[in-house]
Image: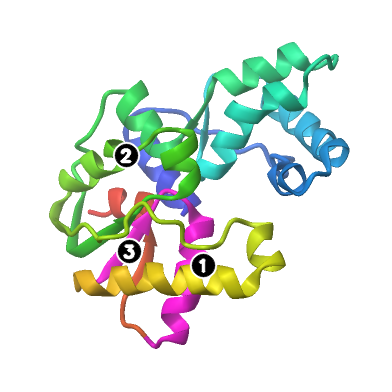
Amino acid sequence: MGISMVQVLERLGHEVEFPMGQTCCGQPAFNTGYWKEAREVASFFVDVFSQADVIVAPSASCTAMVRNFYGELFRNHPKAAAAAAVSGKTFEFTEFLVKKLGITDLGARFEGTVTFHDGCHGRRELNLKEEPRKLLRAVKGLELREMGLCEQCCGFGGTFSVKFPDISTAMGEAKVGSIEETGAQYVSSCDPSCLMQIGGILTKRKSPIKTIYIAEILASR
């Protein structure tokens, strides 16, 4: 997924750097209530990425954490200004392409039928809906089929799936049922964590439908 994202950005003429020292954005600890521990991890994130011109993430959930919650996490903290600066230049991948660069057609070709899952963080915290769809509709050979429950949660939710596995699985089963109803060959999303949850359930059901991160489609020729 990361390689595909880099390929797309480099084809557009951007120089991509991958800081080898980077770690987590701090979201798992933050969502579980361990703000002190989350702040330590997030502080390192701020240090690592502070010199970047733009930060592009392959995950809407990580983007939402940095942009929407760093302000609260670093309130009255010595790194509050640095955290705000990092938040302001962090973008989800499709958001960066469409909103920041104004690009919807990447000249990609991908043969197959695809349905799209709106991850909760991308849809509800970043207000992303049409951005990924504009990119997919421009892909030659691709047929986009909307599922009935496209905005319904897949049930992953990070630590939610660990704390409430039965509820998580039931939500995932409902989502996969909606995916299967489309008859699509692939299900794509802007959140790898959602695809991991959906992919696990598809495998258990022995479904022929495959998961594919959106950058993998957009990098195809």
Amino acid marked by disc 3? Val
Proximity of marks 1 and 3: CB atoms separated by less than 8 Å: no
Where does the magenta region start and end?
184-206
Query: What kind of element bears circle 2?
Result: loop
As for residue 200 lying within the magenta part, the answer is: yes
The residue indicated by pointer 3 is: 187
Disc 3 versus disc 2: nearer the observer: 2
The residue indicated by pointer 2 is: 129
| First-in-chain label (1 vs 2) | 2
> Residue 28: horizontal and vertical position, in percent?
71, 49
As for residue 105 lying within the magenta part, the answer is: no
Query: What kind of element bears circle 3?
Result: strand
Residue at (43% x, 75% y) in the render: 173
The crowd level at tag 3 (other Cα within 10 Å; few <14, some 14-19, many 20+) is: many
The crowd level at tag 2 (other Cα within 10 Å; few <14, some 14-19, many 20+) is: some
Query: What kind of element bears circle 1?
Result: helix
User: In this orientation, which residue lies closer to the viewer: 104 or 124?
Assistant: 124
Is 45 positioned to the left or the right of 39 in the image? left
Residue at (18% x, 42% y) in the render: 107
> Residue 8: horizontal and vertical position, in percent?
35, 41
Instruction: Work out whether 204 lies above or below 69.
Output: below
The residue indicated by pointer 1 is: 197
Residue at (86% x, 41% y) in the render: 37
Spatial separation of the CA atoms under disc 3 and disc 2: 16 Å
The crowd level at tag 1 (other Cα within 10 Å; few <14, some 14-19, many 20+) is: many
